[in-house]
Amino acid sequence: MTRRVVVTGIGAVAPTGLGVAEHWRNTLASASGIAPLPDAEALPVQAAGQVRGFDEAAHLENRLLVQTDRWTWMALAATELALADAAVDPLAEYPFHLSVVTSSASGGNAFGQREIEALYKAGPRSVSAYQSIGWFYAASSGQISIRHRVKGACGVIVSDGAGGIDALAQASRLIRRGSEAVLVGGTEAPLSPYALVCLSSQTTLSRERDPARAYRPFAPDAAGHVPGEGGAMLVVEELRRARLRPAPTVYAEVAGTAATHDAHHHDCAAPDGRQLARAARVALTRAGCGPDDVDVVFADGAGDPAGDVAEKSALAEVFGSRRVPVTVPKTMTGRLSSGGAALDVAWAALSLHHGVIPPTVYEDRPVASGLDLVTEPREAPGLRTALVLARGSGGFNAAAVLRALADH
């Protein structure tokens, strides 16, 4: 019998809030976390999605704060929140049945910047002994596994904005092969000066000064995207195991995932969107459903005209003339790179659980988008199947199908 994979815990550390309740409440209030950056005039981007009110010292002991970067602080905090939401205590579990998979894109930017500054100002002896691990892509997975005594398969996926779904796919494979539960997701902290300079070469980065207009995917005058920090961690479990625990919340089933690559350009997505469409079709096939079964699409939402046209082409290839509801709630957070798809999966799971489609937030309604773009929270009591799309810089595409459990 196939082992089914379900989401039972959500931990958000995002511009939309800390913890699942605050995140969902702010989402339905269309409360954007995109704001002007301090000293924006000296930076290549004017606005970004920023996590407010995050006190890392409230979640982590000083030892870990010294050894790790803000990106890992948020991953550790999001994991704690997800475990609490799922009512799972890893220390009470058989450690070889638990696994960790995170997505990562740029690693510990602020940590690396600080130590590079120390190197050039004061020499090699001034560099922290933790430089070799603090910035490293696998730091979050390693620190989560150490903190929670997780001894099953652990790893990290590096595929930029597609990474959250790719990590979820790996988590699903692990559960189908015998793991009982996986801590999975991703976070990003790309707002240090060094990180923003690295991003500045992206031609799709928005230079718009007004935060309300800086990131408007599918709008005719879309200016590009803004970066953001944060993300989400999830607890995914084997369904029968979840049902044996006292009153778990099963948000949604992970019914199918898929990944493709454009093989087109090192930076720009393929203009036809065909490989994104293929990822969606394969994920639907693996989920045992078709395009007509999809009730909502959580779009990637590149925010630049070429990227948006490619995604619209992909949606047309998958759905034909059917106008399936489409939403881009990351308009409240910016594009979170390795944290973006993880947060979108969290949004999709919450949407299925509550029967509400979260909004795409704009200063004004877009016109002539050619899509049924959800711009206000939309009640959808019959919501059953969600398709989540994600793309990463370099040509990565990923898709996930989440399904509400009819019998739960």
Image (spheres, rainbow, N blue to C red):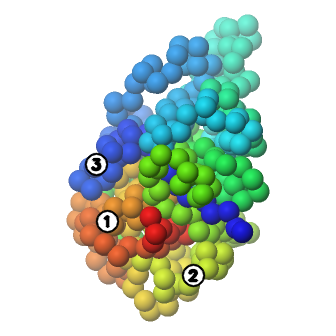
The first of marks 3 and 2 along the sequence is: 3
Q: Nearer the viewer, residue 112 or 173?
A: 173
Residue at image coords 67%, 29%: 149
Q: Quadrant of residue 128?
A: top right
Q: Which mark is residue 26?
A: 3
The CA distance from mark 3 to mark 1 is 14 Å
Can you see residue 398?
no
Q: Percent from the top left, x then y, of residue 4? A: 63, 63
Amino acid, disc 2: Cys
323 vs 130, left or right, is: left
Q: Which mark is residue 356?
A: 1
Which residue carries the number 2 mark?
Answer: 289
Can you see residue 250?
yes
Amino acid, disc 3: Asn
Where disc 2 sits, the SS reads loop
Q: Which mark is residue 225?
A: none
